[in-house]
Image (cartoon, rainbow, N blue to C red):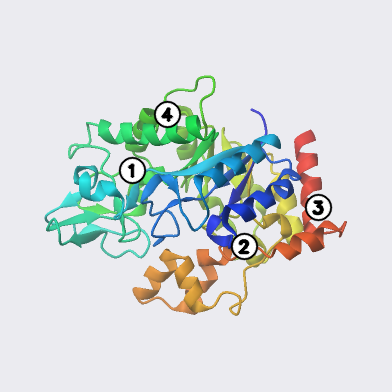
Amino acid sequence: MAKILVYQLYPIAWKTGLKGMIEMIPRIAKLDVDYIWFSPLYFSPRYDQGYDIADYTMIDPRFGTIDEFDIFAEIAHRFGIGVLMDLVLNHTSVRHPWFKKNPEYYCWSRNPIIGWENLFNRQSAWEYDRNRDYYYLHLFHPKQADLRWFNSQGKELNMDLVKEFKSIVNFWTKLHKEDGFRLDVPQSLNKDFSKDTLSFSDLLCGEYATKVINAIFPPKQENSPFLMMECFDPMFGPIMEKYYKNTSVDYVLNVLLKDEFLDKKRDYSEAFKRNVDVNGLMLDLESHDSIRFPSRRFEPKESLFKLFNSGAEGICLYQGQELGLCNPTKDELPDKLMLELDAQTEMRYLAGGDLDELRKTSRANARVPIPLGEYVRQEVDEHSVLNYTRHLVDEWRMH
C-alpha cells in the first residue's frame, strides 16, 4: 500500500474562509501532502459547527461560494493534492429540507425509548417535534436528527436515502472534481431498535454501517473516490480490520488512539504497535475533535517524530499541528467562545458540568484560528517545528 499523507482543514477556524484556505495551499504542499480533507463546508445553521448539514450541495456563504471551492480544488490539483469532503451519514440538521418534505427519512417514535442516551451528554436521545407530535432521535445535538437507513426490523435498506447520497457523491466527484470523502462516525448507523437501551458501545460492531457504505460506494473500480472513515475501536484492531476488509474504504482512522495519551505520559510504542499492524490504518494524533497534542505534556518534535516513525502507511495531520501548537489560553479562548465552538462542551455544561473541568478536554481547543504569523516566523527558523516536520515527512517517504 502506498504511503498517504492527509492534511485536515477546519473551516470555522478560518475567518477569511475559502480565500484564506486557498492562500494556505502552497504551505500545505511543502509538506508533500496527498490529500486535503475539509471538515464540513456545507450550508449549515452551525449548532454543531457544520456537522448539522442543511444542504449537502451548497457551500456555506460564511466560507465562500462554490466557484471559490472549485478554484481551491483546481489549485490543489496543480500541486498534486486531492480534495476530500466530509460526508455525514448519520444525521442532518432539522433545517434540512428532508426534515419536512421527507420525514420518513428520520427516526421517529410516539413513545421515545427511555434507555437511549445522547452521546454528547448522556441525556435523552429523543426530542419532541410539535409539528408532527412525535419524538425524533438525535444521538448528538438536539438540532441534528438521525436518519433512518433501515426499516423497523433492520432488514430492508432505505433505497431512497441511498439514491440521495449517491446523488450527493456524484455532485462533488463529477461536477466539482472532488477526489473523495471522509465518512463521519458511520458506526452510529448500527442502531438496533429492538433494544431498550443504547449506549456508545452498542454501536461499535453492528452490520448496518457496512451495508450503508457498500450501498453508496460499491467495490473499488478505476476512478473510485478515495475513502477514509472515522472509527472507534477500543480493541485497537478487530473493528478497524472489519471495516477495511468488508467495505470499499481505503483507510480507517481510530479516534480512540488519542485517548491513550490523554491523562499522563505513556510509552507510545505499545499503543502505536497495536494500531500500525492493522491494514488500512490512517494514524492521527490531533483533529477538530481533540485537544492539541503538546498540551498532553508531550514535546512537539518528540510527538511528531513518534508519529512519522510509527510504521504507519497513512498519516493525517491537523491544521497547525506542524507548528507544534498548544491549546489556547483562557484569554484566547474565553468561556463564551468555547461553548460556541463546541456543542459537546455546551451540552455537558448545560447538563451540570464544570466549565474549568470541561475546558481540559474541550474540542474547542483545536478550533480557534491558526496564528498565521507563526508560519512566517517558523519558515525562517531552520530549527522550528515546521521545518522539522517537513524533514520528517521526507524521511517517512523514503523509508
Camera-side residue: 39 or 248?
A: 39
Q: Secondary structure at mark 4?
A: loop
Task: Report the mark closest to the observer, 4 or 3.
Answer: 4
Residue type pointed to by label 2: Arg
Residue type pointed to by label 1: Leu
Q: CA distance from mark 1 to mark 4?
A: 16 Å
- First along the sequence among labels 2 and 1: 1
Residue 177 relative to residue 147: left or right: right
Q: Is residue 185 above or below residue 124?
A: above
Disc 1: which residue: 189
Q: CA distance from mark 1 to mark 3?
A: 40 Å
CB-based contact (under 8 Å), mark 3 and mark 2: no
Q: CA distance from mark 3 to mark 2?
A: 18 Å
- First along the sequence among labels 1 and 4: 1
CB-based contact (under 8 Å), mark 1 and mark 3: no
Q: Is residue 236 visible?
A: no
Task: Report the mark closest to the observer, 4 or 2.
Answer: 4
Residue 11 relative to residue 219: left or right: right
Q: Secondary structure at mark 2?
A: loop
Q: CA distance from mark 4 to mark 3?
A: 38 Å
Disc 4: which residue: 217
- First along the sequence among labels 3 and 2: 2
CB-based contact (under 8 Å), mark 1 and mark 4: no
Q: Secondary structure at mark 3?
A: helix
Q: How dense is the environment of label 4, judged by Cα within 10 Å: few (below 14), some, or many (20 and up)? A: some
Q: Is residue 222 above or below residue 274?
A: above
Residue type pointed to by label 3: Tyr
Q: Residue 249, image x and y in percent?
A: 49, 32
